[in-house]
Amino acid sequence: MPNIRIAPSILSADFRRLQQQVEAVVEGGADWIHCDVMDGHFVPNISFGPMVVAAVRKVTELPLDTHLMISRPEQYVNSFRDAGADRLIVHAEATVHLHRLVDQIKQAGMQAGVAINPATPLQAIEEILPDVDLVLIMTVNPGFGGQAFIANMLDKVRRLKRLCEARQTFPHIEVDGGIDETTAVDAVKAGANVLVAGSSVFSQADPARAVRQLRKAAERAAAVAA
Ligand code: DX5
Ligand code: ZN
């Protein structure tokens, strides 16, 4: 069975009924819930903070894959841990001391992931690869849901996969931004195994079905790629 993980992003959920929206994707077989935290500083948009993560925590036991698009992430590690995050994904661009921050996250009892923006080269994370549980390749510029997938990022995913193999270290490879049934197939063939999907799931009348369809497409692609 391929190692695909589907992580719906609640950024595109209807916040008037967040609980039902989360329950719907859980019912559809989501593996993780992706929480997009934005501060209006590191990215141009503001979304939500630990309080909403804590609310989602009360709705599901699925791992909360928490993507911090914020400046000075080191100041908020404990707040998100206390809110119930299982993994913190931090941007390499948002901190000077990435290794220290990754350590801090692990010391706080969470898994640590690292994200890079489309224009950031893989070299920025090469030395941290053995220390993280996940690498997130942004396939849009972070800040908003519903943007178009940047196809050039597929080559970056391929190169990351090769780099991991060369270094014999195997973090999850997550893609985030513009993922739907079509781009998911390309991303999985390139080497990604975790698919974040916001608008392609929550813009559907039946988000559970959207999750199932996405998984079907991704697992088919993974079987072909194997
Ligand atoms: C973008 C966020 C994404 C976003 C993806 O800044 O990191 O997780 O929710 O949304 P879609 O799937 O709509 O591109
Ligand atoms: Zn995200």
Image (cartoon, rainbow, N blue to C red):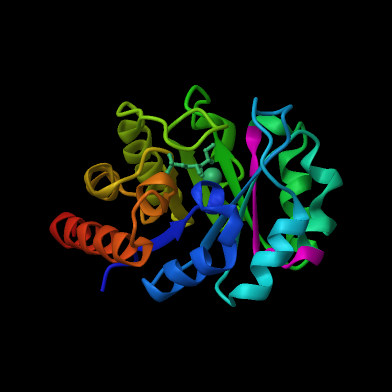
At horizontal 28% and vertical 50% (from top left) the residue drawn is: 188
At horizontal 53% and vertical 25% (from top left) the residue drawn is: 120
How many tags in the picture?
Answer: 0
Q: Find residue 17 and report its horizontal and vertical position in percent.
A: 57, 61
Q: Nearer the viewer, residue 122 or 173?
A: 173
Q: Is residue 16 left or right of residue 153?
A: right
Residue 140 colored magenta?
no
Q: Is residue 169 visible?
A: no
Image quadrant containing the C terminus: bottom left
Q: Quadrant of residue 150?
A: top left
Q: Quick check: 18 above or below 100?
A: below
Q: Find residue 38 and report its horizontal and vertical position in percent.
A: 67, 38
Q: Find residue 168 and report its horizontal and vertical position in percent.
A: 44, 55
Q: Is residue 153 visible?
A: yes
Q: Quadrant of residue 82?
A: bottom right
Magenta stretch bounds: 82-92
Name, please, the residue furthest toward the top: 119
Q: Find residue 42 and report its horizontal and vertical position in percent.
A: 70, 28
Q: Is residue 80 left or right of residue 31?
A: right
At horizontal 22% and vertical 64% (from top left) the residue drawn is: 216
Name, please, the residue furthest toward the front: 16
Q: Nearer the viewer, residue 134 or 71?
A: 71
Image quadrant containing the N terminus: bottom left
